[in-house]
Image: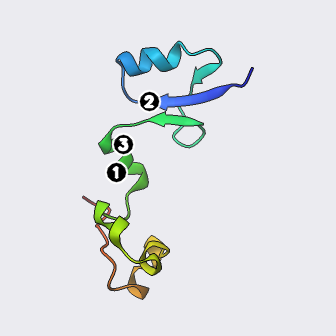
Amino acid sequence: MTKVRFRTCLRNTIYDALRNRPGWTETDSDSDFDFIWADVPWMREHFDGFSPASRALPPSCRAVQPNDRARAPGCAWRSSSG
């Protein structure tokens, strides 16, 4: 049986459903999981970078890493502070 490590900050029906799946175990790690059910604040804290509008950006902007912002002034960057 395959083991799936899951993480969630929710303690509701989602948590119950994940916990009761055969072979699924909860992890407290912020980086060592196979599946995550996260809320928006958690996603912003851990994966912040582009704004949702970045999907409409040309591929040249999508490939730019956050530390290379100066090299792509036409890209729609969001501040990671909020």
Using the image, determine if residue 82 lies above or below residue 43. below
Which label is found at residue 42? 3
Q: Residues within 10 Å of mark 2 (few under 14, many from 20)?
A: some
Q: CA distance from mark 3 to mark 1?
A: 5 Å
Number of numbered labels in the structure image: 3
On the picture, is 21 further left or further right than 1?
left
The residue labelled by disc 1 is: 44
Q: Residue at x 36, y 74 (%)?
A: 57
Q: Tell which circle, 2 or 3, labels the residue nearer the N-terminal end.
A: 2
- Residue 22 in which image quadrant: top right
Q: Pointers 3 and 1 in contact (CB under 8 A)?
A: yes
Q: Secondary structure at mark 1?
A: helix
Q: In the image, residue 26 lies at what x, y percent?
A: 55, 23
Q: Amino acid at mark 2?
A: Thr
Q: Residues within 10 Å of mark 3 (few under 14, many from 20)?
A: some
Q: In the image, residue 4 lies at what x, y percent?
A: 63, 28
Q: Residue at x 43, y 87 (%)?
A: 71
The residue labelled by disc 2 is: 8
Q: Residue at x 50, y 20 (%)?
A: 18
Q: In the image, residue 24 lies at what x, y percent?
A: 60, 21
Q: CA distance from mark 1 to mark 2?
A: 15 Å
- Residue 55 in which image quadrant: bottom left
Q: Nearer the viewer, residue 82 or 35?
A: 35
Q: CA distance from mark 2 to mark 3?
A: 10 Å
- The quadrant of the picture occupied by the N terminus is top right
Q: Secondary structure at mark 2?
A: strand
Taking the view exactly as shown, the residue that stands out farthest to the left is 82
Using the image, determine if residue 57 lies above or below residue 9. below
- The quadrant of the picture occupied by the C terminus is bottom left
Q: Amino acid at mark 3?
A: Trp
Q: Amino acid at mark 1?
A: Arg
